[in-house]
Image (cartoon, rainbow, N blue to C red):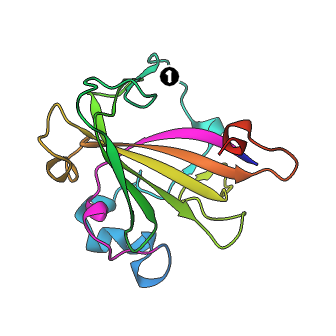
């Protein structure tokens, strides 16, 4: 039923600290720079990833710790809180979940993931691939825990955050075996 495409986005935006933004109207993307100083750049969300213009780089694999059940310290508990943050479903992670490698400038700790979705399966993703919007998009939000003591300290710093995005598409004729087990 779902197929995913992966994209990586490094950015530091104070938008996470506030709820006063939208995707349309006076608080839409074209106005984000008016309200948030870090949102006026050319590589700012939402973006359209054009494959023919993308540079292929080989940095090696990402190294994930804690994401597949292997924690650094098994005695430390892990949990999650599911909340409605006013824009979406957000899952706050409590535990040792880390990622490094893959061209990242540091090691990052996962703090939450959230979803973007729309009214139908043709729009909902925040970003686009070759001009196409997907039914939904999931973002895993991480912060550079080597350079910063907390997510709050890293959120508005260059390369303070690494956000991993996954497009979710509806497939009418094919089920995803990983999701049918749920």
Which residue lies at the image location 28% right of the left edge and 50% below the top edge? 12
Examine the image and state in which quarter residue 71 appears.
Answer: top left
Which residue lies at the image location 11% right of the left edge and 41% below the top edge? 149
Q: Is residue 15 magenta?
A: yes
139 shown above or below 119 = above
5 with respect to 28 (left or right): right
128 with respect to 115 (left or right): right
Which residue lies at the image location 40% right of the left edge and 79% below the top edge? 27
149 shown above or below 169 = above
Q: Name the residue under label 1.
A: 57
Name the outermost residue toward the right: 173
Q: What stretch is highlighted in magenta?
A: 3-22
Using the rendered image of the protein, determine whether residue 111 is visible from the camera's viewpoint: no
Which residue lies at the image location 33% right of the left edge and 46% below the top edge? 79
Using the rendered image of the protein, determine whether residue 46 is visible from the camera's viewpoint: yes
33 shown above or below 101 = below
Name the outermost residue toward the front: 75
Binning the other alpha carbons within 10 Å of mark 1 as few (below 14), some (14 to 19) or many (20 upward) gives few
């Amino acid at each position: 039923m779902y197929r995913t495409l992966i994209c990586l986005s490094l950015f530091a935006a104070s938008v996470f600290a506030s709820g006063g933004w939208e995707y349309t109207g006076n608080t839409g993307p074209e106005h984000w720079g008016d309200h948030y100083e870090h949102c006026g750049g050319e590589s700012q969300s939402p973006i359209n990833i054009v494959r023919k213009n993308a540079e292929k780089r080989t940095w090696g694999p990402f190294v994930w710790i804690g994401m597949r059940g292997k924690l650094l310290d098994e005695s430390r508990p892990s949990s999650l809180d599911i909340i409605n943050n006013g824009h979406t479903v957000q899952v706050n992670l409590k535990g040792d979940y880390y990622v490094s490698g893959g061209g990242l400038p540091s090691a990052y700790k996962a703090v939450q993931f959230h979803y973007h979705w729309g009214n139908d399966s043709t729009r909902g993703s925040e970003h686009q691939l070759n001009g196409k919007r997907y039914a939904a998009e999931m973002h895993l939000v991480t912060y550079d825990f080597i350079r910063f003591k907390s997510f709050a300290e890293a959120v508005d710093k260059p390369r303070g955050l690494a956000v991993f995005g996954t497009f979710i598409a509806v497939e009418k004729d094919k089920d995803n075996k990983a999701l049918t087990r749920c």
